[in-house]
Amino acid sequence: MSYSRIAFELSEDGIALVTINRPEKLNALNATVIAELDDAFARAASDDAVKGLILTGAGEKAFAAGADIEELAGKTPVQAREASVAGQRAFRRLELMAKPSVAAIHGFALGGGLELAMCCTVRVASEDARLGQPEVRLGMIPGYGGTQRLPRLVGRGRALEMLLTGEPVDAGEALRIGLVDHVVPRAELLGFSRALLQKMTQNAPIAAALIMDAVDVGLSSGLEEGLKFEASAFAVAASTEDRKEGTAAFLEKRRAVFQGK
């Protein structure tokens, strides 16, 4: 697929930079953007050259300011459900990708923009970021997973306050409640995000994928199921060439060179 509303750049270090490119619309998520993101996430997941992904928005004002309201206003209930399912499918593809991802958030991350950021492995916000779920102010509810992921990140009470008031939080408050993981100056956002992702991608990729799976299984299925999955994943990791390389490198006091095998 050729892209008209996003950019996909792969650097030599294996990091894909995916940029939502509708700055004139504050990077609002219309059907074209959703379809292109879905394709980009599938591409990143399947391409062995991609080790990790950074997601951001073009321009100075927004990561993504939510759904395209003009497009949304004309949808029938059936079309609205189809749009919700399409967005959920694309965002879930990012969330389930067996490679780490970083949301590099600046300016507005509202509605669908915040829902998208919450699907990344970690979130880095610039000091000017404003994050929220304002759908209730439009007589709507989040449709791309906001009612499910927000309480998992910040707790039921804080999530309901944000969802029911529609009021955004600034970067400092987002950090305090666990909605983002780091806050940095705007000029350092992409550099910090890349350095953070590089720390993850230099480690064993199979082990990293198993870790992400184990965390998700435990959070969705409970402690007992999570522990069972962890034990099985531990055995899988022990069978890999990367485990042999990692333990040998430790004993030989050298840096491990992982091959993803």
Image (cartoon, helix red, strand yellow):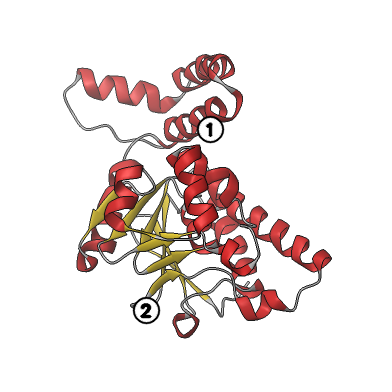
User: In this rendering, is residue 215 above or below 24?
Assistant: above
Tell me whether the residue at label 2 lies in contact with that at label 1, contact meaning CB atoms closer than 8 angstroms. Answer: no
Q: Which residue is mark 1?
A: 216
Left or right of 32? Residue 119 is left
Most extreme residue toward the left is: 253
Q: Amino acid at mark 2?
A: Gly
In the picture, the disc for residue 238 is: none
The location of residue 3, given as percent across then percent down, is 57, 76
Q: Residue at x 50, y 19 (%)?
A: 230
Quadrant of the rendering where the N terminus is positioned = bottom right
Instruction: Please state which of residues 8 and 21 is positioned toward the viewer in this rendering.
Output: 21
User: In this rendering, is residue 118 above or below 35?
Assistant: above
The location of residue 215, given as percent across then percent down, is 48, 29
Q: Residue at x 57, y 58 (%)?
A: 43
The location of residue 8, given as percent across then percent down, is 47, 68
Question: From this viewpoint, is residue 97 visible?
Answer: no
Q: CA distance from mark 2 to mark 1?
A: 33 Å
Left or right of 246? Residue 134 is right
Specify which label sits upstream in the sequence, 2 or 1: 2
Instruction: Please state which of residues 199 and 157 is positioned toward the viewer in this rendering.
Output: 157
Q: How packed is label 2: few (under 14 Cα within 10 Å), some, or many (20 or more)? A: some
The location of residue 217, given as percent across then percent down, is 57, 28
SS at badge 1: helix
Q: Which residue is mark 2?
A: 59
User: In this rendering, is residue 245 above or below 153?
Assistant: above
